[in-house]
Image (cartoon, helix red, strand yellow):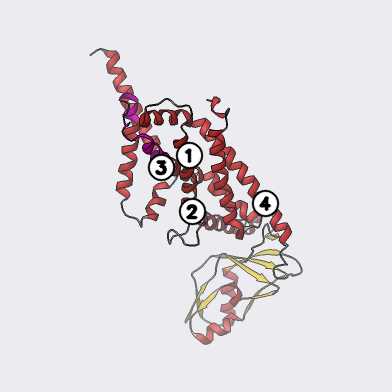
Amino acid sequence: MSAGILAEIIVGLASGLMVAGGVFAVVVIISIVPRMAQLSNGKHILLYESCISAGISTGGWHLLYPLQLQMFGEFGNVVCGIFFGVFVGCLAVAIAEVLDVIPILCRRSKLVQKLPWLLLAISLGKTAGTLAYFLLPGFTQYK
Amino acid sequence: MEILYFKAPRMVNIIQKKRITVGDLGDLQGKPELVHRAKKLPVVQLRGGEKERKLVSVLDVIQVIQQEIKGALVVNLGSADVVVSYKPRAQQKTNFIWSGVKTIAICGVLFFGAMFAIMTFHTDAAVPDVFVEINRIFTGREEQRPIWLIGSYAVGLTAGSGIFFNHFSKKRLSDDPTPVEVEFADYEKKVEECLQEMLSDEVNFGQGELAGSTEELQE
C-alpha cells in the first residue's frame, strides 16, 4: 500500500467525519428534531437521530455505489419528493433570520392579531417561489 | 415581626391613574388586614398628561410599607425594578383601513421575500442537479425537469412550513406553544429587561425617564 493511498484514506476519513458532524449539527440547530418530537409527544427521539445518521450515510455511499431503486419508478419519485419538501419547508422557516424577524415585525407594525396572515404569506411565497423556479425556464442556468 | 411577601412583574401598564399605589405595582401576601392597609399606600406620583415610562425600585416600596407598618419584614419575590408604563387614556379607536393597508403591504413584502429566499437557496444548494440525480435513481431516465418530483416537492414544502408554524388550523397540532410564540415571549422578555437597564443606568443612557413608548400593546 503506497503512501499516496494511505494519505487518501486518512484525508477521506477525516473529511467524512467533519462533514457528517457539520450536517448533523445543521439539522439539529434548526430545531427540527425537537419540533417533530413535540408533534409525537416526546417519544422516539433516539430513533429520529438514527434516521438522520442513516440518511447521511446513504447519501454519502451513493457517491461510490450509486443506488439502483428503479423498481419503485414514479412512485418512489413522488414519495421522495414529498419528504424532501417537508424537510426543506421546516428548514426554510426555522432559520433564525426568519424566526426572529417575525415577532419584531409584528410588534413594530402593530399587527399582532394578523399573525396567521403573515405566516400564510411566507408559506405561499415559498411555494410560489419553488414552482416558479423549477417550471419557468431560465433559472437553472445559474449554477 | 410581621412578614409580607411582595411580587411585582417587570413591567406594569397604568392607564390614566397618576398616583401609583403598592397594589398597582404588584401582589401582596400576608396577614389580611396588613395587606389591605399596605395596598393603598402611594409609592410614586406621575406627571401625567403624556405617555411616559418610569422606573420604580422595589426598595421604595419596602420603605413605604415599613414607614406605615412598624416592624414589617417585606420579602421580595419578583423583579427588583418595576417599569411603570403610563398612558393618559385607553386604546384609541383602531383605524381599519390603515390596518388593512399595512397588512397587505407587509404580506406582500413577506410573500416576495420568501419567494426570493427560497429561489436563492435552490440556486445556492444546486437543487435541480440533485433532483435530476434522484430521478435517475428511481426511473433510470435522464430528465432535465422531473415533473412528479418537483410537484411532490412543492406539496411537501407547503406542508412542512405549515406543520412548523402550526397556525393554520383551528385545531392545534400539539399543546406546547409554537416556535413563533416562543420567539414572541423571548423578545418581550428581552425588551423589558433592556428597558430596566436603560432606565436604571443614568451614566450610559442619560436621564432615568424614557418619554414616549416605541410600541403600543393591542390588547
Give the alpha-carbon distance from disc 2 to disc 4, as whole Å. Answer: 24 Å
Task: Name which quarter of the figure residue B194 lies in.
Answer: bottom right
Give the alpha-carbon distance from disc 4 to disc 3, as whole Å. Answer: 32 Å
Chain letter of the residue beneath label 3 in the structure image: A
In the rendered view, tell whether residue B122 sits above or below residue B186: above
Q: Residues within 10 Å of mark 3 (few under 14, many from 20)?
A: some
Q: Is residue A137 magenta?
A: no
In the rendered view, tell whether residue B158 sits above or below residue B87: above
Q: Which residue is mark 4?
A: B104
Q: Residues within 10 Å of mark 1 (few under 14, many from 20)?
A: many
Chain letter of the residue beneath label 1 in the structure image: B
**Disc 3 marks which amino acid?**
Phe
At x 55%, y 67%, the residue is B9
Q: Which mark is residue A131?
A: none
Q: Residues within 10 Å of mark 4 (few under 14, many from 20)?
A: some
Front residue of this view, candidates A60 and B11:
A60
User: Nearer the viewer's eye, disc 2 or disc 1?
Assistant: 1
Asked if both marks, 2 and 4, belong to the same chain, the answer given is yes
In the rendered view, tell whether residue A3 sits above or below residue A98: above
Chain letter of the residue beneath label 4 in the structure image: B
At x 53%, y 58%, the residue is B185
Contact (CB < 8 A) between labels 2 and 1? no
Q: Which residues are magenta?
A: A60-80
Which of marks 4 and 2 precedes in the sequence? 4
Asked if both marks, 2 and 3, belong to the same chain, the answer given is no
Chain letter of the residue beneath label 2 in the structure image: B
Asked if both marks, 2 and 1, belong to the same chain, the answer given is yes
Asked if both marks, 3 and 1, belong to the same chain, the answer given is no
**Disc 4 marks which amino acid?**
Ile
